[in-house]
Image: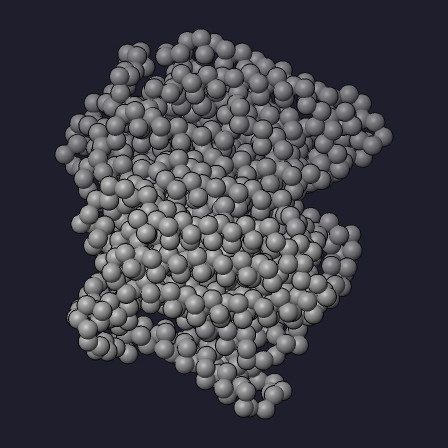
C-alpha cells in the first residue's frame, strides 16, 4: 500500500494493487473468525454450558493452519512471493511461524475454557482478543515492510494488554495489565523511532528496498542507521523479553491469568522473534558486524539473568517468567549466529518451546485453583501423590525446559548450540549451557516439591497425602496437556520432521512482482 | 594401521539378531512395563522388574559369549540413522574395553534389585532402576557422540529420583548436588561435542557427522591445539563423573544418602561412565591431547588415591568410608588409563569391573547392616562377628578384594596398573602404591572396629545373613575369587582393544610406549593384516 | 540544514516523553508521555519524508496517529480498571508483585 502511494507520488496516478486474497488467507481467517465470534456471541443468549466459544476459536485456528498447507506447497513449487504491492511476503518462514502461533492459540484456548468457568468469567471476549492478537502475530511474521510490521506488532500487543487485565476482580491482573501496557507502549514507541531512523537512513520502509539500499551503498556515516538498529532492537527486545528489556516480564507473567501467560510465552514470543529474525538477520544481514555484538551481549545477559533470578523465586509463575527470559537468551543465540542454520535453530526452538511452555503454564493454571492464586512452591508439595498424571506431565515439561535428552528441549538447545558454534561463538555456547544448569536447579526444586512428601507418606501410610483437596483437571485442559506432552516427547525422539521443516523455512525477501 | 584396526567393523553380529539394541531396549521396556503394573499390587511390580533385569543380564552374558576374543575392533555393530539432518545414528558396538562393563551392568542391576528392596513405593523405584540400566548400557555401547551424550545425560534423571525419593535423611541435598555437578560437567561436554563435530566437518570439508569412529579416524581434521581445548571440555565432564580429586565432593554425599541399590549402581556402574568416557572419548577421540594432558590427569589420579585413603580413614560413617574408598580406587583407574601403557590400560579396564563388583558388594553389605541396626556409625557397631559369622566372612572376602589381596580380583587390576604406570611414570606409581597400603589400613581398621570385640547389648541381637541375602552375595563373591585366581579369559579379551588403543595414541602423538611394555606381546603383529579389511 | 532542526525537536520531545514515562506517577500523565514519544516519531517521519521525497513517511505518520488513538483508548480503560479496584491512579502504588 505504501509502495503504491510512493508510486502514486511519482507517476501521479492511482491504481489499486492486485491483492491476492488467498495468500493472506491465514490472517483473514483469524480476523474473520474473531469478528464472527464477537458478533455471534453478542447475539446468542448467554449462559450456555457448552464451551462453544472455545470450540469456534480452535476451529478458526485450525482452519488458519489448514490454509497454510497449500501455500507451503506453492512456495515449494514456485518459490516465495510477495503480495499487496510487496508489503506482505509469503515464504516458508512466515508459514512456519503461522503454524506455531496458531498452535499456541489452540493450546492456550483449551486451557482458557476451564479457567474461565472456574473463575466465573465466561464470555467470548478473551477468545476474540486472542484470535486478534494472533492475527497480529501472523502479520508480523509475514511483514515485508516496516509499517506492516509495526501494525502487526500493535495488533498483537494491544489485544494482549487487555488479555492481561482480563480478570477484572483480581487486582494483580489489573496491575499486570498496566505494567504490560506502559512498558509495551513504551517499547513500541522505541521501535517506531527506530523505524523512523532506518527510513531516514535508507529512504524506504520496505524491507526489500532497505536491503537493496544497504547492499548497494556503503553508508559512510551510518550513525542514523546504527541508532535505528539499536532502537529497533530495544523494541523487539521488549517483546521477546530479553535482558535488559525484561523488567516487565516477571510482574506481567505473575499477575496475568495463567492461560493467557501460556499464550504470551509461546505465541507472542514467537511473533517477536519472527520480526527480529526477518528485520535483523535478513534485512540487515549485510550490517551484521554492527548489530551482532549487541545481540551477543543481550543473549549472554538474558541467559544468565534469567537463570539466576529464576532460581531465587518462591512463586512458581514468577520463576517460570524468569526461565522464559533464559529461553529467550537461547533463541537469541540463533539470531546472533545470523546464518541459515541459526534461523532454523531458532525456529525449531520456538516450535518446541511453544509446546513445553504452554504445557507448563497449563499445569500451573490447574494447580492455581480458584482465584488463580496458588502458585507458591509449597502449593506443589505432594502433587506427585495427589495427582500423579498431572505431576508427571509437569515433570516432562520441566525436564524438557531443562534440556534433558529425549525431550524436545534437548534438541532445541542442541540446534542453537550447533548454530552458535558454527558461527564460532564458543563462549556463548558455553555460557548458555551453564545457564541451563543453573536453571535446572529451579526445575528440580519444583519437581522435588512435588515428590517430596514421601516422608509423611511413610508415617501416615499415604492417608494424609491424599486428604488434600482434589484438583479438577477440565477435560479440555487434559486434551491440551496430552497434546503438549506428546509433542514434547515426540519431537525429542523423532526430530527429523520438525527440523527438516525448520531447515526449509528460511526467510526470504521478495520484491513485489509489479 | 590402528585407527583402521579400531574402526574395523568385523566380528560376529549374532545372526542378524540386534543383540546390543535389545540390551538397551529391554530394560527400558521393562521400566515401562513396571510403571504400568496396577498400583494395588506392588509385589508384582517387583517381580516384573526383576524378570526384566534378569533377562537383560542374560542378554549381556549372551553378548559376552558372542564376543570374539582376539579382535581389536568393534563387534556386533548395529547402525541405523536417527536424525538425518545431523547425521546422528543409533550406532552401537562393543569391543574389549566395553564388553565387561556391559556384563557388569547387566549382572549388578538384578543383584541390587534383589539385595536392597526399597522401603516404600516399589513400583516407581524399580521403574527408575530399569531406566537407569538402559541408560548405563547405552553409554557403554554408543558409538555416536550424540547418542553417547543422550545416554550419559539420561542416566541423571532416574538416579536423581532414586536418591531424592528413597535415600536417607539428607537425600534432597545430595540428589541436587549430584545432578548439578554432573550437569555442569555435561554442559562443557555438550559444547565440546558439538564443536568437535562441527570442526571435524569443516576440517574434512564433508558433511556434519557425529559418528565416533569416523571422527576418531580423521585425526588430522582438527588442529592439535583446538583438540586440546575440546579434550578439556570432555575431560571436565568425565572428571566430575569419575570423580577425580578437586571435583569429587558430590560423591560422598550422593553415595551416603542414596538408597542401597542406588549406591551399588552409583559406585558399581555410574562412576565407570567417567573412566570409560576417558578411554573412549579421551584416548580414542583425542589421542594427541590425551598424551599431552596425561601428566595432569595422572597427578590428579594419584592425589585422589592418597586423598581418598586419608579421608576414608577419618570417617565415622561406614557408608561414607566406602564412598571415599571409591575416590581412591577411581584414582587408580585414572592412573592406569593415563599411564598410556598396555598393562596400565588393561589394569584400568579390569579394575573398573573389579571395583564395580567389590564396592557394589560392600555397599550391599553396609545396607544389610543398616537394615538391622538402623545406624551406620562405626562407633555404634561392635562385635558383629560373634553375632553373624557368615556375614563377617563375606565382608572379609569383599573387603580383602577391595584392598587388593593377592588371589582376589582387586590384586590383578592394581598390580597391572602399578606395573603399567611404573613404566612411564615411575614416581607416580610409587606414590600410588602407598595408596594400596593405606587402603588396607582404613578398611582393616574399620573391619576391626565393627566386627571384632564383644557385641554390646544393641549389637548382640544382630541377625545372621538371610538366605536371600546370601544368594545375592554369592555370585559377587564367586566373581571376586574367579577373577582373582584366573583372570586370563578376561584379560585376553581386553588386550587386543587396549593394544590398538595405545597404538592409536602412539600414531597420532609424540608419545611412544616404552619397549618393556610391548615386549612379548605378539598380538600386535597380527594387526596390519586387518588394515585392508576396513 | 532544516532537517537537523526537526530531528533535534523530535529528539527533545522523545526525551521528554521518556522522562515522563519513567518519572511520572500519575497513570494518565504516563499515557500522555507515551503520546509525546509517538508524536516525536511523527515529526521525524514527516521530516524524513520531505527529505527523501517519498510519501511512505507521511503515510506512516497517519498510521501512527491512528494506532496511538487505539493505544490510548486501551490504556485509559486499563487505568480505569485500576481506579475502580484501588481508587487511585498512582502507578507507584501498584506494586503487589516484587522479587
In the rendered image, residue B292, in percent from the top left (x then y), is placed at 34, 19
The residue under the point 53% across, 35% down is: B181
Horizontal side, residue B95 vs residue A465: left or right = left
Horizontal side, residue A117 vs residue A495: left or right = right
The residue under the point 61% across, 79% down is: A122
Along the line of sight, the residue nearer the viewer: B443 or B57: B443
Asked if residue A46 is positioned above or below residue B451 in the image, the reply reads below
Q: How many marks?
A: 0
In the rendered image, residue B69, in percent from the top left (x then y), is placed at 31, 33
Asked if residue A479 is positioned above or below residue A225 in the image, the reply reads below
The residue under the point 32% across, 52% down is: C2
Q: Is residue B231 visible?
A: yes
In the rendered image, residue B230, in percent from the top left (x then y), is placed at 35, 31
Q: Farthest residue to the front: give it.
A: C2
Asked if residue A347 is positioned above or below residue A474 in the image, the reply reads above
Along the line of sight, the residue nearer the viewer: A502 or A190: A190
Q: Farthest residue to the right: give it.
A: B457
Instruction: State which quadrant residue A66 falls in.
Output: bottom left
Asked if residue B480 is positioned above or below residue A511 in the image, the reply reads above
In the rendered image, residue A404, in percent from the top left (x then y), is placed at 47, 49
The residue under the point 16% across, 30% down is: B529
**Quarter the C terminus of chain A occupies:** bottom left
Amino acid at each position: 500500500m505504501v509502495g503504491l502511494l510512493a508510486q502514486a507520488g511519482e507517476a501521479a496516478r492511482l491504481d489499486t494493487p492486485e491483492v491476492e486474497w488467498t495468500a493472506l488467507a491465514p490472517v483473514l481467517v483469524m480476523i474473520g473468525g474473531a469478528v464472527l465470534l464477537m458478533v455471534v456471541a453478542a447475539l446468542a443468549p448467554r449462559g450456555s454450558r457448552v464451551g462453544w466459544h472455545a470450540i469456534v476459536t480452535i476451529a478458526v485456528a485450525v482452519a488458519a493452519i489448514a490454509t497454510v498447507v497449500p501455500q507451503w506447497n506453492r512456495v515449494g513449487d514456485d518459490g516465495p512471493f510477495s503480495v499487496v504491492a510487496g508489503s506482505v511476503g509469503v515464504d516458508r518462514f512466515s508459514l512456519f511461524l503461522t503454524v506455531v502461533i496458531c498452535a499456541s492459540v489452540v493450546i492456550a484456548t483449551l486451557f482458557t475454557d476451564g479457567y474461565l468457568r472456574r473463575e466465573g468469567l465466561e464470555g467470548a471476549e478473551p477468545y476474540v482478543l486472542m484470535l486478534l492478537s494472533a492475527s497480529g502475530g501472523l502479520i508480523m511474521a509475514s511483514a515485508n515492510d516496516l509499517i506492516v510490521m509495526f501494525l502487526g506488532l500493535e495488533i498483537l500487543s494491544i489485544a494482549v494488554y487487555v488479555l492481561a487485565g482480563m480478570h477484572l476482580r483480581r487486582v494483580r491482573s489489573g496491575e499486570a495489565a498496566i505494567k504490560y501496557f506502559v512498558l509495551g507502549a513504551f517499547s513500541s514507541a522505541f521501535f517506531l523511532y527506530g523505524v523512523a531512523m532506518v527510513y531516514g537512513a535508507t529512504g524506504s520502509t520496505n524491507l526489500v528496498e532497505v536491503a537493496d539500499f544497504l547492499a548497494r551503498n556503503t553508508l559512510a556515516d551510518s550513525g542514523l542507521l546504527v541508532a535505528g538498529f539499536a532502537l529497533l532492537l530495544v523494541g523487539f527486545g521488549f517483546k521477546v523479553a530479553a535482558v535488559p528489556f525484561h523488567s516487565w516480564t516477571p510482574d506481567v507473567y505473575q499477575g496475568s491469568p495463567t492461560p493467557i501467560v501460556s499464550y504470551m510465552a509461546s505465541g507472542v514470543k514467537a511473533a517477536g522473534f519472527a520480526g527480529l529474525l526477518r528485520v535483523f538477520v535478513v534485512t540487515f544481514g549485510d550490517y551484521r558486524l554492527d548489530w551482532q555484538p549487541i545481540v551477543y551481549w543481550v543473549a549472554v545477559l538474558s541467559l544468565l539473568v534469567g537463570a539466576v533470578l529464576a532460581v531465587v523465586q518462591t512463586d512458581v509463575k514468577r520463576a517460570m517468567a524468569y526461565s522464559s527470559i533464559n529461553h529467550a537468551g537461547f533463541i537469541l543465540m540463533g539470531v546472533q549466529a545470523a546464518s541459515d542454520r541459526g534461523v532454523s535453530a531458532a525456529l525449531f526452538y520456538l516450535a518446541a518451546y511453544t509446546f513445553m511452555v504452554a504445557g507448563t503454564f497449563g499445569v500451573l493454571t490447574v494447580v492455581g485453583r480458584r482465584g488463580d492464586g496458588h502458585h507458591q512452591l509449597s502449593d506443589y508439595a505432594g502433587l506427585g501423590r495427589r495427582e500423579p498424571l498431572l505431576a508427571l506431565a509437569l515433570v516432562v515439561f520441566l525436564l524438557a525446559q531443562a534440556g534433558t535428552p529425549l525431550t524436545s528441549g534437548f534438541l532445541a538447545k542442541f540446534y542453537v548450540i550447533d548454530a552458535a558454534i558454527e558461527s564460532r561463538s564458543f563462549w556463548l555456547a558455553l555460557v548458555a549451557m551453564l545457564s541451563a544448569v543453573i536453571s535446572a536447579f529451579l526445575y528440580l526444586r519444583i519437581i522435588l516439591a512435588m515428590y517430596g512428601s514421601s516422608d509423611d507418606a511413610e508415617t501416615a501410610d499415604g492417608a494424609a497425602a491424599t486428604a488434600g483437596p482434589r484438583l479438577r483437571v477440565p477435560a479440555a485442559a487434559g486434551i491440551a496437556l496430552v497434546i503438549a506432552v506428546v509433542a514434547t516427547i515426540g519431537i525429542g525422539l523423532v526430530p527429523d520432521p520438525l527440523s527438516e521443516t525448520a531447515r526449509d523455512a528460511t526467510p526470504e525477501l521478495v520484491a513485489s512482482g509489479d | 594401521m590402528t585407527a583402521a584396526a579400531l574402526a574395523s567393523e568385523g566380528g560376529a553380529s549374532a545372526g542378524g539378531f540386534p543383540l546390543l539394541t535389545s540390551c538397551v531396549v529391554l530394560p527400558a521396556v521393562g521400566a515401562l512395563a513396571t510403571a504400568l503394573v496396577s498400583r494395588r499390587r506392588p509385589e508384582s511390580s517387583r517381580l516384573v522388574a526383576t524378570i526384566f533385569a534378569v533377562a537383560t543380564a542374560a542378554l549381556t552374558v549372551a553378548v559376552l559369549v558372542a564376543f570374539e576374543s582376539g579382535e581389536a575392533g568393534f563387534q556386533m555393530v548395529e547402525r541405523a540413522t536417527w536424525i538425518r539432518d545431523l547425521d546422528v545414528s543409533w550406532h552401537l558396538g562393543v569391543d574389549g574395553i566395553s564388553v565387561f562393563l556391559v556384563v557388569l551392568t547387566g549382572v549388578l542391576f538384578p543383584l541390587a534389585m534383589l539385595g536392597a528392596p526399597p522401603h516404600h513405593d516399589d513400583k516407581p523405584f524399580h521403574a527408575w532402576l530399569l531406566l537407569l540400566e538402559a541408560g548405563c548400557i547405552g553409554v557403554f555401547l554408543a558409538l555416536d557422540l550424540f547418542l553417547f551424550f543422550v545416554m550419559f545425560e539420561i542416566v541423571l534423571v532416574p538416579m536423581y529420583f532414586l536418591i531424592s525419593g528413597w535415600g536417607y535423611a539428607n537425600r534432597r541435598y545430595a540428589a541436587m548436588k549430584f545432578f548439578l555437578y554432573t550437569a555442569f560437567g555435561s554442559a562443557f561436554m555438550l559444547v565440546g561435542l558439538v564443536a568437535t563435530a562441527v570442526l571435524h566437518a569443516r576440517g574434512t570439508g564433508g558433511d556434519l557427522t557425529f559418528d565416533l569412529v569416523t571422527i576418531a579416524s580423521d585425526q588430522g581434521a582438527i588442529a592439535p591445539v583446538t583438540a586440546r581445548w575440546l579434550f578439556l571440555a570432555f575431560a571436565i565432564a568425565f572428571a566430575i563423573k569419575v570423580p577425580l580429586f578437586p571435583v569429587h565432593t558430590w560423591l560422598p554425599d550422593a553415595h551416603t544418602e542414596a538408597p542401597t541399590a542406588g549406591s551399588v549402581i552409583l559406585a558399581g556402574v555410574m562412576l565407570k561412565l567417567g573412566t570409560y568416557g576417558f578411554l573412549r572419548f579421551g584416548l580414542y577421540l583425542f589421542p594427541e591431547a590425551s598424551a599431552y594432558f596425561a601428566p595432569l590427569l595422572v597427578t590428579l589420579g594419584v592425589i585422589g588415591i592418597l586423598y581418598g585413603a586419608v579421608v576414608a580413614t577419618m570417617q565415622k560413617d561406614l557408608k561414607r568410608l566406602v564412598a571415599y574408598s571409591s575416590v581412591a580406587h577411581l584414582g587408580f583407574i585414572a592412573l592406569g588409563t593415563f599411564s598410556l601403557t598396555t598393562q596400565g590400560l588393561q589394569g584400568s579396564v579390569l579394575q573398573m569391573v573389579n571395583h564395580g563388583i567389590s564396592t557394589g558388594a560392600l555397599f550391599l553389605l553396609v545396607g544389610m547392616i543398616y537394615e538391622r541396626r538402623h545406624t551406620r556409625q562405626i562407633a555404634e557397631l561392635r562385635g558383629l562377628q560373634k553375632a553373624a559369622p557368615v556375614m563377617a566372612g563375606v565382608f572379609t572376602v569383599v573387603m580383602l578384594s577391595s584392598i587388593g589381596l593377592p588371589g582376589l580380583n582387586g590384586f590383578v587390576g592394581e598390580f597391572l596398573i602399578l606395573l603399567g604406570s611404573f613404566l612411564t611414570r615411575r614416581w607416580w606409581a610409587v606414590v600410588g602404591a602407598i595408596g594400596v597400603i593405606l587402603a588396607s589400613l582404613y578398611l582393616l581398621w574399620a573391619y576391626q572396629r565393627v566386627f571384632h570385640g564383644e557385641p554390646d547389648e544393641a549389637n548382640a541381637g544382630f541377625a545372621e545373613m538371610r538366605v536371600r541375602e546370601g544368594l545375592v552375595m554369592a555370585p559377587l563373591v564367586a566373581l571376586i575369587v574367579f577373577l582373582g585366581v584366573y583372570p586370563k579369559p578376561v584379560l585376553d579379551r581386553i588386550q587386543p582393544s587396549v593394544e590398538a588403543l595405545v597404538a592409536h595414541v602412539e600414531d597420532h602423538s609424540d608419545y611412544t610406549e616404552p619397549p618393556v611394555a610391548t615386549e612379548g606381546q605378539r598380538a600386535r603383529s597380527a594387526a596390519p593384516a586387518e588394515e585392508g579389511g576396513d | 540544514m532544516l532537517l537537523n532542526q526537526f530531528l533535534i525537536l523530535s529528539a527533545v520531545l522523545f526525551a521528554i516523553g521518556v522522562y515522563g514515562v519513567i518519572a511520572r506517577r500519575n497513570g494518565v500523565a504516563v499515557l500522555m508521555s507515551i503520546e509525546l514519544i509517538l508524536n516525536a516519531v511523527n515529526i521525524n517521519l514527516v521530516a524524513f519524508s520531505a527529505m527523501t521525497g517519498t510519501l511512505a513517511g507521511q503515510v506512516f505518520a497517519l498510521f501512527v496517529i491512528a494506532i496511538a488513538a487505539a493505544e490510548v483508548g486501551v490504556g485509559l480503560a486499563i487505568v480505569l480498571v485500576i481506579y475502580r479496584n484501588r481508587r487511585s491512579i498512582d502507578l507507584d502504588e501498584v506494586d503487589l508483585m516484587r522479587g
